[in-house]
Image: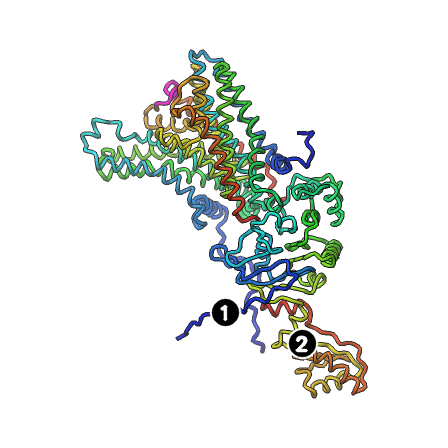
Amino acid sequence: MAALAPTRLPIYRLLLRSQVSRARVLALLAIGIVGIVVGFAIGAGDRIDELRAGARFINTFGLSLLVPVTALVFSAAALGDPSEDGTLVYLWLRPVRRSRIVIAAAASSFTVAWPLVVIPLAVAAWATGGGSALVTATVVASTLALVAYTGIFCALGLRVKRSLVWGLLYIFIWEGFVATANDTAGRLAVRTYSRSVLTEIADVTLRFSAISSPYRWIVPPLVAVVALAYATRRLRRQDVA
Amino acid sequence: MSDARILDRGYRAYTGPRLGVRGAVRSLIVHSIQRALGLKRPVWQKILPAIAIFIAYVPAIVFVGLSVLLPDTLLREASGVLPTYAQYYGFISAAIVVFTAFVAPELLCTDRRTGMLGLYLASPLTRDTYLAAKAVATVALLALVTLGPPLLMLLGLTIVGSGPDGPIALLGLLAKMVLGGLAVAVLPASLSLAVSSITSRRAAASAAIIMILLASRAVSEALGATASTPLYFGLDLLQLPIELVFRIYGEFSEIDGARTITTGTLVAAYLVWTFGFGLLTWLRYRRLTVTR
Amino acid sequence: MTVLLPPPPPPPPPPVPADARIVVERVSKWFGDLVAVSDVSFTVGPGVTALLGPNGAGKSTMLRLLCGLTPPSQGTVAVFGGNPRDDLSLTRRIGLVPQQETLFENLSALGFVRLAAVLHGLDDPEGAARSALAVVELDPDEPRPIAGFSKGMRQRAKVAQALVHDPDVVVLDEPLTGLDPRQRLHLITLFEQLGAAGKTVLVSSHVLDEVERFGRRVLVMAQGRLAAEGDFHAIRDLMDDRPHRVRIRSDRARELATGLLERGVVVGVRLGDGDDVIVDAVDAARLRREVPVVAAELGARLYEVAPLDDDLESVFRYLVGG
């Protein structure tokens, strides 16, 4: 990074800097640390099935909470903040392809969110004593979920005001409530796919993880691509400033 | 003689009645409740409270409808068809989380961000009475989803003839209902007030409240499944008040680990959290710089 | 009973001059029920043009339309013949100073302007940014991030980012707010220089004495409509129903006024307290011709002939009904 001249990847660098605020990073880091502590507590307990206990914890704490909320906090702000405070005009009124702005925004929020999410979860997974398969499963599943959520919330940030609120409603009312009604509704939630990946790699069974093999790998990135394409279209059409 | 006259002199001293501290507190409570519900505000501001209230009240209406439609014999035999009043909270926990996350940030953060707090404190309100008014408003708003639906269910069941037998039983049930409704409202209210006193960004406060509620649940669940001591249950800010409601009705919930914890410990944990968050809020406001 | 007649059709837009760079044709813009710009047509060529109007007249919306930041609800906007909304290459030829205060707060002024230079694909973004900052008198080596800038410094950083790529059209929305008098003068001089160098400079303002200093060509907007365009003295002369008020100082002021009245040049005379009279004339050009003639006939010495309401403010007040 340091070796990169300030003229390379200018939008990515700009948005990266604007998203990294101390309060945001510290708050999310604190939650990650709570996850690690709980991971150790699970590992220290006298459980017979540590793999299953660990996988359940990664699912409820990581895939259902830490991953989507962290993605929301950064991705919704990536283009949402400049759009709301009017600084988007300083990127928009330049001979720069709109897709480039959107991709830079998604890449920058992914860059900030990934270490804040995947590292604590991987450590927590290791601490539960669920074995290396659980660690690998955690890294892959949370990365995959982060890709999808980054795309979704980048588009959301550009589309609505108060995107954090709507994003939270999506995460907790839609994904956490409506999409747990049955398997069909579950297919409309990102976390069902990442949960399926977790169970496949770690070789455990969890509820609502019945997505068959190719789809659980293809759908999350596809969701991101579609969402970013929508965001690009939106950026081209919407009013600026 | 000139016929000139001045019709408006700009500033004029107020000569009407002065309502004092009580009037100020009362109007602050009323305005806070109106604001959070989106009353007298654009339609966008009404959506969120409408969703939460919808989620909270629909089960009550459905259950009353069921008790009308299903024959008495079936209801008596299959006792699991209608939930108990305590079990009802399991159906509406999403509405409680939504309201907890959005009410207090709306009431506290907005005033600090827009500078309204300075104007309020220039009125007969002090920091303490201001906070008290906001706390009352928050609890009242939460009671709208925690107390209203069971009351509606009771009313419906009484009308269709499936309510409690006799006025004394009814009064006893009402007392439990109010106590239970407040129990589910007060702890989340103090949590959300505390978080809202830390950041003046409304959305950040909402996100933090939801995170804390759900993370405390996930953590308590993970630890409770592991350790034999039931104390971890006290970490669960979402289930703790609901479990308390079960005890108020003299029941036990089906939550793992809840049965082993004594009611005394439960009440103690509840009070520690509630007063802890309250104290944090009070300290934050005592040290707050209102105007520069 | 009142019969509502359809409004008369607006006059056809004047023919587009050959050097027009911005062509606005029958443009309307509404946001829901609010009509911000209503059926406006004008052209802007090289030089400085001031866009005037009271607050809420639709100036900012008009400037946003010109830069393609929002599409017109009706009509067309063309800059160098292209649509600024779709044509990305046009952004190289447009520089905008928007109204809002917020910038990229954690960048330095140099970083902010350099970012613009980089995105415009300039060969030497660092050098271009430094010279743009020098033009607005901001220190390129100022280490503070923009978050710590005063309003005037922000305003100048905004001007620098708009000029860094040497655009042919510079659009400035209220660029002088928050500046101290010296900085105002500096920027006004800068606009004049840009105009003299053949750039199209379009400046909006609601502060009239500012505008009077940087250009005689004005576009006046009121309530979303174009109220007038052109040289403001010429606009004043068109306002026939309102007499021009001129103060004449002379050693024989009363006789002079009488003479002018007799010839029908002036329609009203008010005597001043000493050697001056204030006359109202419908035809300002004729008054200018006749005053020296009458003075010569009477053998009077003229000390001063000064128009009292030929300034922009009175034109403006007349047009926007203030």
Magenta segment boundaries in residue numbering: B254-262
Mark 2 belongs to which amino acid? His
Q: Looking at the picture, how far across and down is residue B283, in whole percent?
A: 56, 34
Tag 1 and tag 2 share a subunit: yes
Percent of width and height locating residue C38: 53, 62
Is disc 1 placed on a helix, strand or loop?
A: loop
Of circles 1 and 2, the one toward us is: 1
Say the numbered circle drawn on residue C9.
Answer: 1
Badge 2: chain ID: C
Question: Residue visible at 56% across and 38% down?
Answer: A78
Label 2 neighbourhood size at 10 Å, few (<14), some (14-19), many (20+)? many
How far across and how far down the image is residue A55, in percent?
A: 45, 19
| Label 1 CA crowd tier, 10 Å (few <14, some 14–19, many 20+) | few
Q: Which mark is residue C244?
A: 2
- Lower position in the chain sequence, tag 1 or tag 2: 1
Q: Is residue A84 visible?
A: yes
